[in-house]
Every structure is written in structure tokens, then in C-alpha cells.
Image (spheres, grey):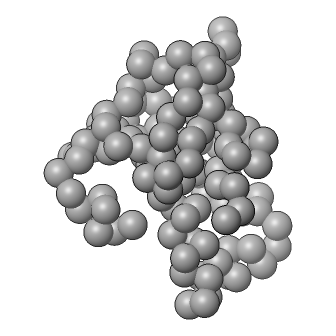
Amino acid sequence: MEEALRGDGPFTVFAPTNNAFAALPAGTLDTLLLPQNREQLTSILTYHVVEGRVLSGDLTDGMQIPTLDGQTLTVGVTHDGYTLTDASGGMATILNADIEAGNGVVHVIDSVLLPAAS
């Protein structure tokens, strides 16, 4: 993941809040950090990254966004804002959009997105 993001980019990162990580079932994060689960952790992290600079104004309802993980996220647009639905049917709301970064843009989200199990 670190190697992928060191590139020139641009990249778009959907960054979960600390509360989003805290809401994961007890022990999940500790389990993912074990060396034998490195591939699963990498998959989850790269599922939060998109190639290219995608601003909130570029998002349309029903849009499928390909992630660095090779799977997609589905965008929802309402009068209240933007959501992302993951492969498991989980939904994250964009809390803070269009934060400029050196090699792209960051959108803060309220949930950890989960790719489909491989």
C-alpha cells in the first residue's frame, strides 16, 4: 500500500475516521495486524484508494468506482450528501470531502469499507 501511494498519483483516498475503526468488532483490528493476515489487511486498505483525483463534484448516483484492490465501490448521491456502498453491502457516508493532498484528494468517511472475500 505504501509503495502504491508513493507514486506520483493522483490518488483518491476514502479515509475512515478513528471512530470507524473503533466500531469494528472487538479484536478485528488486532487480528488484521498479525503477519499472517497481511494480504487481507492490504486488500482492505487498497479498497479505500482509487486511481485518479475524484472530487465530490465528480460523483454521480450509481457510479461504480474501481479501487486499487481491483473491486468497486458504488456511489450514492442524495440531498444530504454522498455515500459509498462496499461489496458486502456496507455503507459509508462521506463526512468531509475534497481535502487536497500532495498527490491527490482525501474524503473522510464514517465506516471501514470491506471488499468481497476472495
Image location of residue 70, percent across then percent down = 50, 52
| Residue beneath the point at 69% across and 55% down | 116
Dividing the image into 4 quarters, which one contains the N terminus? bottom left
| Residue beneath the point at 21% across and 57% down | 7
Compared to residue 27, the image places residue 117 above or below, namely above
Dividing the image into 4 quarters, which one contains the C terminus? bottom right
Compared to residue 81, the image places residue 112 above or below, namely below
Nearer the observer, 101 or 6: 6
Quadrant of res 95: top right
From the viewer's perspective, tell me whether residue 41 is left or right of residue 23.
Answer: left
Nearer the observer, 1 or 99: 1
Nearer the observer, 54 or 16: 54
| Residue beneath the point at 60% across and 72% down | 40
Image location of residue 35, percent across then percent down = 56, 90
Compared to residue 29, the image places residue 10 above or below, namely above
Quadrant of res 78: top right
From the viewer's perspective, tell me whether residue 31 is left or right of residue 108.
Answer: right
Q: Can I make out residue 19 in this image?
A: no
Image location of residue 81, percent across then percent down = 61, 19
Q: Residue furthest top?
A: 79
From the viewer's perspective, tell me whether residue 106 is left or right of residue 17.
Answer: left
Q: Can I make out residue 53 in this image?
A: yes
Q: Residue furthest bottom?
A: 35
Q: Residue furthest left?
A: 8
Image location of residue 12, percent across then percent down = 38, 41
